[in-house]
Amino acid sequence: MRTHLITGAGSGIGTVVAERLAERGDQLWLLARDAGRAKELAARFPGAKTLVGDLAEPERLSWAFGHQTLPDRLDSLLHIAGVVELGTVGELTPKVWNQQLAANLVAPAELTRLLLPQLRVAQGHVLFVNSGAGLRANAQWGAYAASKHGLKALADALRWEESGNGVRVTSVYPGRTATPMQEKVHRQEGKEYDPGRWITPESVATTILTALDLPPGAEITDLSVRPQG
C-alpha cells in the first residue's frame, strides 16, 4: 500500500485522483484549508487522513504542521490545487498577483520543503499539476501564467536537486479541463461554458496515475494533455 498526500481533493481533477487511489487501497492524506473542510473530506473519503493548512498563507504552513501528526513516509505528493483570476496587466492589483503566486507557486514550494524528509525515505514522487498556461501566456492570463511558469521552474530545479535522493518529479500540463475552475474562467471571459468541449478530469487523472505508476529507474518529467481535435 502506497501513501499519497493530495492538495485539491475537494473538486475537479483532485477528486478523481483521490477516488482512483482510494479504490486501489492506497492510503490518502488530504490537505484541507480549515477544520470544516477537513471534516468534509474525511466524510467523503472514508479511511483518509487529513491535514489542515491554508495554501493562501504558505508562511503559516510550517506552524500549522507543527501542531499536527504528519505521515512517516510519502510515496507521492500531488500538487493539484490552484486558483485563477483573469485580468490584464494594466488592471491586476498586487493583491491579486500575490494571491495567485501564493497559492499556485509559493505554497507548493513550501509544502514540498516541509515534506521532503518523508519523500526521501520512500524515494517518492512529487507531481505538479501545472497548466498549458505554464508553457505560454495569453492576454489576461498574465498573473496565473506567471505563477505556473514559476511552478515549472520549481519542478525543474527540484528534479535536479533530489535526483540523488531517488525522488522523482513530474509536471503535468493539462489544457482546458471540465472542472469548476474552468466554469469560473468562462464566466470571467464572458463566454458560455460547454464542458463537452474540454478534457475530462478522468483523462487528466489517468495521465497522473500513468506517471505515478512508472516502474522504478525512470521518470516522466513533463506531460502535456490537451483536448482532441
Image: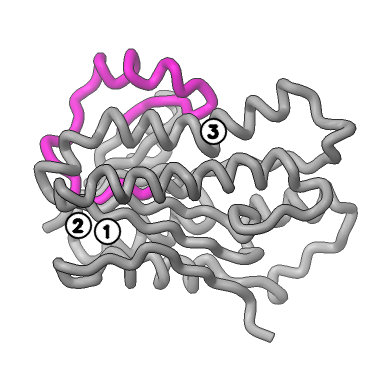
Secondary structure found at label 3 = helix
Position of residue 174 in the picture relative to residue 193 (left or right): left
Q: Which residue is mark 1?
A: 22
Q: Is residue 64 magenta?
A: yes
| Residue type marked 1 | Ala
Position of residue 167 in the picture relative to residue 78 (left or right): left
Residues packed near mark 3 inside 10 Å, few (<14), some (14 to 19) or many (20 plus): many
Q: Which residue is mark 3?
A: 103
Residue at 75% from the left image edge and 51% from the top image edge: 185
**First in sequence: mark 3 vs mark 1:** 1
Secondary structure found at label 2 = loop
Residue 26's disc is 2
Q: Assign the N terminus to one quadrant of the image.
A: bottom left
Contact, CB < 8 Å: mark 3 with mark 2?
no
| Residue type marked 2 | Asp
Would residue 89 be seen by someone viewing this image from the given angle? yes
Q: CA distance from mark 3 to mark 1?
A: 25 Å
Q: Is residue 28 shown above or below 92?
A: below
**Quadrant in the picture for residue 220:** bottom left
Q: CA distance from mark 3 to mark 2?
A: 26 Å
What is the x, y in percent for residue 78?
Answer: 36, 49
Contact, CB < 8 Å: mark 1 with mark 2?
yes
In this picture, which residue range is highlighted in magenta? Answer: 51-78
| Residue type marked 3 | Ala
